[in-house]
Image (cartoon, rainbow, N blue to C red):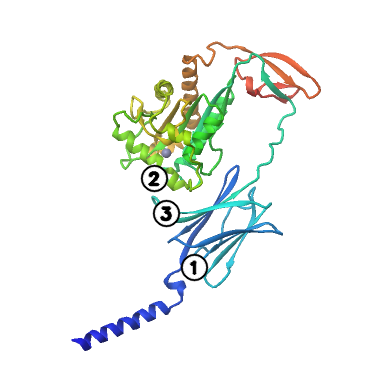
Amino acid sequence: MIGWFKIVISTLSLFCLMVFSMPSAIARDAAILDVRLWTAPDHTRVVFDLNKSVQYRVFPLSNPDRIVVDLFKSDLKVDRLKLPLPDPAITKVRYGKHEPSTSRFVFVTKEALTSESFLLNPSKDKPYRLVVDFKRKLKQQPKEKDVTVTKDVRGKKTIIIAIDAGHGGEDPGAIGRNGLKEKTVTLAVAKALENAVNGRAGMRAVLTRKGDYYVSLKGRVKRARDAHADMMISIHADAVKQRYVEGASVYTLSDRGATPDKVAAALAAKENAADEVGGAGPFAMDDPLLNMILGDMAKKDSLISAEILAKQVLKDLATVGPIKYEHPKKARFVVLGALEVPSVLVEVDFISNPNREKVLNNKRHQEKLAAALLSASENYLRRQGLLDSENRRADVEVDLGHETVKMEFPCANDCQRVSLLGKPVSLLP
Ligand SMILES: [Zn+2]
């Protein structure tokens, strides 16, 4: 018995010896499965998909300016890097083995940049990820127009509507059966709404994201607050297993004390998980005010206003498509957490329904959704006394560079798009 045991042990140790003396690349190295790049206005994000966690380092080099990313004990499993380069931060990327088991990526940058990096654990269908953000230095925006309206002399405040296109970048949101991504639909509707809002006198749209990149949920709230928005609409598209389910629904922030609505709570949990998928990272701001808002301090006024806005949105959306729930629902959505900004989250339809997916992908329908959202916003703003009910004339002061002139023009149609001396003029707050 003892002799047999010894043989087993020695066979085992021989086996162990064989396994562990094999090249580490076979036994232990992490596989780099994909490399992606997203360009945001203030940074460029590079994401490495990994089959397991890795040790890594990121450091800058100069002459020329570069940022090096070393992933220890790793192997690139991609034939060719297909990154959309050059972009505003990075001109090109080189890959090679630094030491036998270190994968080295050298990003040549347009100037000396700083970077932030962090690892993300698997979330939903995303594997381990290494995220490296290349922070751009923002230059002062060049003056776009020679002629600028400096102020609205009547002293009326321009109404600011914050428009939040859900998801983006790493986070596609829900995906339809034919491959349409929620992040694509939300951005298209948001941009159509931005156009519609900016075409109205005395109103201006502020987008929380303008392209295919991720913005943290609190980052979105902060943008709406920083813009002193009068209201905010967060745009999403819903998904369920049953392919026949269709229709829009509208949500507002609930008080902590309120009776939880199971459907709304499940949806909020799903939407609030976006930061994990999108990669908010450890640098996502922890604004004490925002945390307080999400505590018990939510202002009643703002919640009541949001409720009025939500009802109006449902009413107007009913004119362009099916409705899932006739009344607004409430839950604790992080993105609705701006204290002073009445905010609603709109699921414009179910992307999981192939028929609705097709409709959601249609530009004409996206514009109809935007028109309905604008109409609802205007009705709400009129009810709140923030928007005049009749057509008006705008008195503006125009800075021509060498002199300032006062002018008046009708706002019946499109005050934001008048032209002066052949040059477009826009009303600024
Ligand atoms: Zn969503």
Q: Nearer the viewer, mark 2 or mark 3?
A: 3
419 left or right of 308 in image: right
Q: Where is 52 relative to 327, above or below?
A: below
Task: Tell which circle, 2 or 3, labels the residue nearer the N-terminal end.
Answer: 3
Q: State which quadrant residue 206 falls in.
A: top right
Viewer-nearest of discs 1 and 2: 1
Residue 363, can we see it?
A: no
Q: Amino acid at mark 2?
A: Arg
In the picture of the structure, the residue carrying the numbered disc 1 is: 73
Q: Residue at x 65, y 22 (%)?
A: 427
Q: Secondary structure at mark 1?
A: loop
Secondary structure, mark 3, is loop
Q: Quadrant of the C terminus?
A: top right
Question: Does label 1 or label 3 sit earlier along the sequence?
Answer: 1
Residue under the point 23% across and 84% down? 5
The answer to which quarter of the image holds residue 299 is top left
3D distance between C-alphas at marks 1 and 3: 18 Å
At label 1, the amino acid type is: Lys
Q: Which mark is residue 177?
A: 2
Q: Is residue 4 left or right of residue 419?
A: left
Taking 14 as reference, is 284 above or below it? Answer: above
The residue depicted at 33 percent of the width and 82 percent of the height is: 13
Q: Which residue is mark 3?
A: 121
Label 2 crowd (10 A; few <14 / some 14-19 / many >=20): some
Mark 2 lies within 8 Å of ligand 1 (Cβ measured): no
Q: Secondary structure at mark 2?
A: loop
Quadrant that contains the N terminus: bottom left
Q: Kindly tell me whether residue 206 is visible in this rendering.
A: yes
Are discs 1 and 2 less than 8 Å apart at CB? Answer: no
